Each structure stands twice: as structure tokens, then as C-alpha cells.
Image (tube, grey):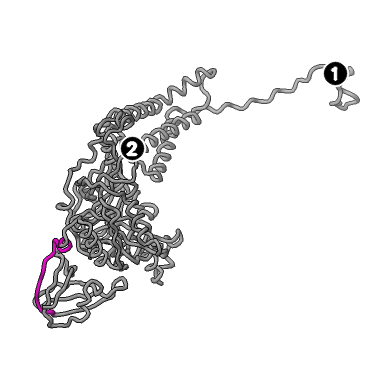
Amino acid sequence: MAFSGSDAGGFRWDGFDSGAPSQQPPKPKKARRAPASPGKRLLISIVITLVFALLYFYIELPPISLQSPDFYVFVLLACAVYCGCTVLTSGFQGQGAKNYFKFLKKQCTVPFFLGVAMLVIALVGGIAGSVLFRAGAYAQLLPFQVGDFATEVNEISYDQIPMLDKQSAQRLGDRKMGELSDMVSQFDVAEDYTQINYRGRPVRIATLRYMDLIKWFTNRSKGLPAYLIIDMVSQNVELVRLEEGIKYTTAEHFSRNLYRHLRFQYPTFLFGDPVMEINEEGTPYWVCPRLVHTIGLFGGTDTRGGVLVNAITGESEYYEEVPDWVDNLYDADLIVWQYDCYGMYHNGFLNSLFGQRDVTVTTDDYNYIAINDDVYMYTGITSVGGDQSNIGFILSNQRTKETSFYSAAGATEHSAMASAQGELQNLRYTATFPLLLNIGGQPTYFMAMKDDAQLVKKYAMVNVQQYQIVATGDTVAECEENYLAMLAQRGVIDGDAGLGGTETVEGAIADIRSAVLDGNTCYFIQLIGEETYYSIGAVEEPLTVILNKGDQVSITFRPGEESILAGVAVERR
């Protein structure tokens, strides 16, 4: 038997090395997974892109409009997601990087050129609306007329003058909520406090909101149960309870969020900030102004009608011209910006930078005043140099944007506030931002003077043109009387001007009542045969203290359509 190195006595010796290379079979290679078919890859990319687009739209709520920069961001992100999905799902195809990128270019051609087209449209539209080339168009955004203040703005009665600013109204609203044991642990007051005219009275409306997410979850089925009305004259706070709660607010979540509710119903509209108002029946509505750009794609922002949303039911309707009870369609900041465009650019763009001939701007702040059952925004107009003096002011209707400019050189609002605070510097009162009133035919700043607790203690009137004329009083009537007397002493008005715009009535007293308002006793007198009451303070007319039913009197009052008219003087006949 022949001997071999691999055989020893019938035993196999695996450790024997013959010196020849081993002949082990190679490991089989993994089969390369075939790439998905083009149709499947396309479907996957489209589905992922659509899911992303729907989620992004639901969360960010971009308008589907070429006038919105958010829309361009939305489209570009969707294109980027599609291209990314194509890269991940295509696999490596072709030999070498050059062929691979050719393949990607072929797959992403449509989203790539769509993105480029969107960027070009945005660039061209932005240039077309640039103030550098369209200064004249910007100067015409706010049409206005020049008016005469003394004849066009009527004097208003005491029960129409707002005594509270927004900060004081918030204090009163928070205090009212603290008194409501059934609500204070679940809700608090939102910070909107919109000023409107409601049934002939200047008031602020404040909505409630859920204190946190848990409170929202436990109360959302019934909605917000009430809203607040703060009377800006009497400082009374009323909680209006609703039979059916408010379910659509800016603080809601998911489909009942007001912004999302609007976007799904009006996907192409651009909206300004919604404000809460109530109609004459007390039904709460959201007034949502529709914004448009009138210069190029992104320039010349203006309001074109608005959507009214029932805050309880969510029913909505778009109006080119909103109903008369609406007071806040045009945002005050938008009106201020539009006037500033006129003031800066009505003599051309270069003049706004060099020379600055007749360049004017609005003053730092603004306020609101009720005129003929509409709310008007007013602000002072000063030169661009900021010399602490006004050349005039504007009044603008916030429902119609009808605007008038009144020439009245004088102090700025903040200078008038400093004058009023200086008159009472020993008491350390602070002045609210002034209201602009017509007192004795003179444009006059009216301010409430508050202590450190934000409580109104006194009132002040400052003449716009001669801001060293400052009058104060414990009541509005006393303050006006002192102010008119000062105007007469300085020769600004005739001595009898304080009775201008008044009427006189005579008769026997049918009823007389009294009430303490702002720490002073006020008497309400009704004459036989009349339904109207005439309010006269005991401080102004001490005779009212000893009047009785049946006394024959002559009452001088300021006319109006209210059931209680402001009396100026009373005499016994």
C-alpha cells in the first residue's frame, strides 16, 4: 500500500502541511438588492412630500398666495423634501459619480426648476414693490383731507369721555375675575381689551382664556362661558355669561383655533390680527381684516374688507364693507405706517434721505376717541427732526379709514403728559396717554391722573397750542370748568364760550336722585313731562343739594341723544 503524507495507519492527520496552498472554496457574495422600480420610487417620494406638506400646512398655516413670503418658504421646503427622498430611494445607479449626478438631475428636474421659478418671482415682485422705485405709490396709501377741528369735531358730553386707559382696564378686569369663585380657578382674562362703542358707550371687551392645557381639556366641550365689558366712563365691569360658550379663540387648539379655522375656510387670504367685538345684541364676533399688497408683490400693505367669525358657532362670512356695528377693521399701526409713508415720500424718495423738505412722521403713540358711534384713532404729527412739538394731528375712522388732518401747532402728547404731571408733582400722579377733545372750540388733551395703584384720582386738561395752560379737577366737570376759566383769563376764548353748544330747559322737578361718582355726589334731575335726566355735580352747583321735587328750575345742559345728559348749570326760578 502506498504511503501518503495524509494517511498514517488508517488515520487522517489534518494538521499535516504538505506545503501546497489550501484549496478552500470562496465565500459566496451577497446578492445586490435590485433598486426599486422608477414608478415605486416616484410614488414613495410623492407620498412623503405630501405628508410633510400637509403637516407643515396644518402647523404653520401659510396662505396659498404669491403675495405671502410664507408661501414661498412652504413651496421651497416641499421641493427640498422631494429631492431628499429621491436621493434616499434611488440607490447608486450608473458607473461613477458623474453618471450618478446625471441620474439625480433627471429625477429632480421638476422641483429644482419650480424652486428656481419661485425665487425669481419673489425677487422680481420684491423689486417691483420697492420704495426706492415706487415712493409715489407709497405716499398715496392713506388718502386724507385737511379739516377744521373746531367745526368738524363736536364737543362730547361727560358720559362719552373715556376715563380709563388699557392698563387701568386690565386691572379692573383682573380684579373682577378674582371675585368669581366658579371661574377664577379655571380661566383668566386675555390681554386684548379691544375698545369699541357699545350701545352708545365707549367700552373695552375682554375675552377669557383657559389657564393651562389641563383646564382646556376639562372645559373645552362647553367653551369659554363669558366675556367682560369694562365701561370706560363709569369704570363698571360687567361679566356677561353666555348660554353657549365661546369655542373659537386665538388660544384654542386644533381645528377650533381661530387662525386654523380661518386658514381652512379662506386658504388664499392674508389676515391681520383678529380683534374681538360684540354686536348690538351682545353676540361675540372675531373681526379678521383681510390684508392685500397693492404695490408689487409684497409692498403697500392695506386692508380690503374682513371676515366676521361668530366666536360661539364658528360661522364666518367675508364682507367687502363690514356692518356698521364693527369698530375695528383697520389696525391703528397700519394707519400710522401708511401716514408715515406719506410724510416721508410725498416729495420723493431722495428727499426723504437728503434735504428732507416737508418730511413729517407720527408721534410715538396713539389713542382712540368715539365720534358719532365710530371709533377714531388719533396721533400727533411732528417734523422728522423730533423737536418735541406737533404741527398737527390726524383722526382716522377705524372702520372706513376715512382720515382728516388738522393743523394745530403745539405740544406733543408726551410733553402734555409731563405738563399735567408737573401740575400735580407733589401728589406723584402719572398721566394716562391723552385723549384729544374739543373743549370750548380748542383742541385739548384730556388725561386721567392715576396713583401708584393705577386708580384714577384726578383729571387734567392741557391746551394743545399753549401747553402751559393746564387745568385739573376731581371730576371731569370741575376740570372742564377750571380749564374754560383759564382759557378765558388768557384771552384764548370769550368769557361766555364755556356755555357754547349748550341749551336751556325750564320746568318743575319731577324726580331728583343722587349717587356718589368718583368720590363726589352727583344729582340727577328729571323735569315734569320729560323722560330725560340731567346730571349735575354738587361740587359744581351746590344749589343741587337743597333742591326738592316741585321746585321750579332752569337747567343749562349739553344736548345729546342719551337718556342722561350732562348739566352745566342750574338756577332756581
Instruction: Report the quarter where the C terminus lies.
Output: bottom left
- Residue 359: x %, y % from top left: 28, 36
Q: Kindly identify which residue carries mark 2.
A: 68
Could you say which quadrant of the image residue 405 lies in? top left
| Residue 506 falls inside the magenta stretch | yes
Tell me the tag on residue 285. none
Residue that lies at the very extreme toward the right in this rendered image: 9
Tell me the kind of residue under disc 2. Ser
C-alpha separation, residue under disc 1 versus residue under disc 2: 83 Å
User: Which residue was labeled with disc 1?
Assistant: 18
> What's the residue type where badge 1 is placed?
Ser
Residue 223 seen: no
Q: How many marks?
A: 2
Neighbours of disc 1 within 10 Å: few (<14), some (14-19), many (20+): few
- What residue appears at the point 18 percent right and 57 percent down from the top-left corner? 493
Q: Earlier in the sequence, mark 1 or mark 2?
A: 1
* Residue ID at (24%, 48%): 306
Element on which disc 1 rests: loop
Kindly state the secondary structure of the residue where label 2 is placed: loop
Q: State the residue in front, 33 or 303.
A: 303
Q: Vertically, is 364 above or below 347? A: below
Q: Which residues are magenta?
A: 496-509
* Residue 100 at least partly seen: yes
Q: Position of residue 527 (x, y in %)?
A: 12, 76
Residue drawn 31% across and 50% down?
A: 366
Q: Is residue 265 left or right of residue 147?
A: right
Work out whether 199 lies above or below 260.
below
Residue at point 27% right, 54% down?
A: 368
Percent across and percent down for residue 504 are 11, 69
Residue in front for this viewpoint, 208 or 146: 146
Left or right relative to 337: residue 29: right
In percent of width and height, residue 4 lies at 87, 19
